[in-house]
Amino acid sequence: MDASNCDVASTNWTHWHGIPWQDAHQVVGRLQARIAKAAKAGEWRNVNRLQRLLTRSISAKALAVKRVTENQGRKTPGIDRQTWSTPDDKWQAVGTLHHKGYKPKPMRRVYIPKANGDRRPLGIPTMRDRAMQALHLLALDPTAETTGDTHSYGFRRGRSTADAIEQVRNALGRKHSPKWVLEGDIKGCFDNISHEWLLAHVPMDKGVLRKWLKAGYFEGNALFPTESGTPQGGIISPVLANLALDGLQSKLAGLFRTVRDARAAKVNFVRYADDFIITSSSRELLEEKIKPLVQEFMRERGLELSEKKTLITHVDDGFDFLGWTARWQGGMLLTKPARKNVKNFLEKIRGTLRQMRTARQEDVIDKLNPVIRGWANYHRSQMATRTFAKTDHLIWQALWRWARRRHPNKGERWIKARYFRRIAGRDWRFAEKDKALLTLTSFHKKLHVKIDGSRNPYSPEDEDYFDARLARKMESDLKGRRKLAWLWYWQEGLCPCCNQKITKETGWHIHHVIKRSEGGSEQMSNLQLLHPNCHRQHHVNE
């Protein structure tokens, strides 16, 4: 089907719940695959033409509105105080995503706490501006994925921090691996990227990009201009930052004239967002050649390395990266949760207990279990067994103090009997009735298979590869939930309504083919896994 008439069917759409999402995804997916193919071939005129087609497509506009009305920030308004919460609002919003006369509004500035106690500024765009960013992201992301560094893992489809730390292990985990590491830290990366560089090098509609970059922000009742940086809080900002930092890997490779020289230098590069490390065979090479090259690379983009936080470290001394400590010890590379990361996690647990001094035990368990599960899943791919056991003990101490504060006039035996149970042969489990607090040691090590950096999620040739990775991930996520796992595999991982992947990120609802009120059973033959929005749409259209 020719791209110029690929969206004809959309002329028959009349309301939000009448949108055939399967068709919309197919239209956008085909155009994205063509954009990725053109970018790989270096056909930039064709890239621009296809991007224009996509951003004018009503299918893409509908998907953009769908994204911003289903994510976690959907209830947080911008300066216009508007949210699109009803189907009519969403349908009307699709018609507002036109380029002619578009002028973004300033963002609403808020501050969120950082791990070190400081506050990070965050801009909240209006719903319309978020949707416009999501629309252009659909066109920009295939290009960014095609041209991105092989070992860049932050804010990219199918990649994670686990992939980044596994690449660190690949680079440093062998007997003859390099022993010196440059820990890169960029001063205020998102706030300082040069607007001129972005406008000159980012392959998207320059007029729209310029408007976003210069939109400014409101703090209190005062309007402040933006002279540098990407619109933090915007959906497209991480991709813009990645595009600004891409190319450093090839710059490093160009340092050496011959393959022999490159092998002797043992230079490896790993980046996650604005955090990166560079390995080398010697400290001198890092200081005299690599660091000046990185500084020049950053300077071209309006960025600067932090002299205080950019360190050159020997692997025997260890370094922190993405919440893990990597250190060569006992003839092998150990990667375990960093002390600072453990400290922040425990402070979160203790802070929650302080806030819930008078809460019911059941509510405390419900509040803490997602925190424990999330932290354990993050670290379980590395060497965390001893850290988990020690941290479990420290959590127990915090729980014991919480329980004793509630009953200062009761004895220790009474408190133990009230709040702690013996479950599955293990005593002192913080539990009430059939609900128990999770323990870190119950999460066993789960090996992570690193993504092949050369793969592209927008390339049809790599579709089977990403499908297989998703299947392994979902199998792990659904372990112990046999009914859900069976349904997912029976449906081949697809939602029957829109024919798109069901993932942990999209979420799912269980749908009864024959309603329970009409005598429908809980048998597998009467159940389906649907996306939450598809489930709502199905019942509206019944």
Image (cartoon, rainbow, N blue to C red):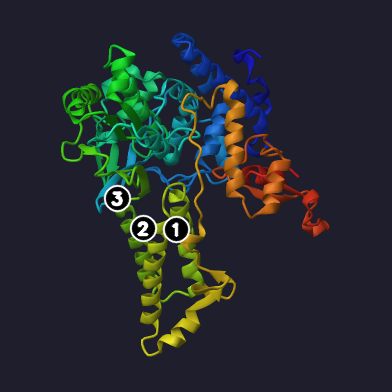
- Label 2 amino acid? Phe
Q: Position of residue 170 (x, y in %)?
A: 40, 34
The local crowd at label 2, few if under 14, some if 14 to 19, many if 20 or more residues have their Cα within 10 Å, is some
- Label 1 amino acid? Val
Closest to the camera, between mark 3 and mark 1, is 1
Q: Between residue 202 and residue 116, name the one nearer to us.
A: 116
Mark 1 / mark 2, whichever is N-terminal: 2
Residue carrying label 1:
371
Q: Between residue 66 and residue 540, name the one nearer to us.
A: 66
Q: Tell whether label 2 touches label 1 (CB within 8 Å).
A: yes
Left or right: 205 in relation to 222: right
Residue carrying label 2:
345
Disc 3 to disc 1, C-alpha distance: 17 Å
Residue carrying label 3:
114
Q: Position of residue 164 (x, y in %)?
A: 40, 37
Q: What residue appears at the point 57 percent right and 42 percent down from the top-left corner?
A: 473
Whether 71 is drawn above or below 444: the answer is: above
Q: What residue appears at the point 31 percent right and 58 percent down from the top-left corner?
A: 343
State the SS at label 3: loop
Whether 253 is drawn above or below 76: the answer is: above
State the SS at label 1: helix
Mark 3 / mark 1, whichever is N-terminal: 3
Disc 1 to disc 2, C-alpha distance: 9 Å
Q: Between residue 183 and residue 358, name the one nearer to us.
A: 183
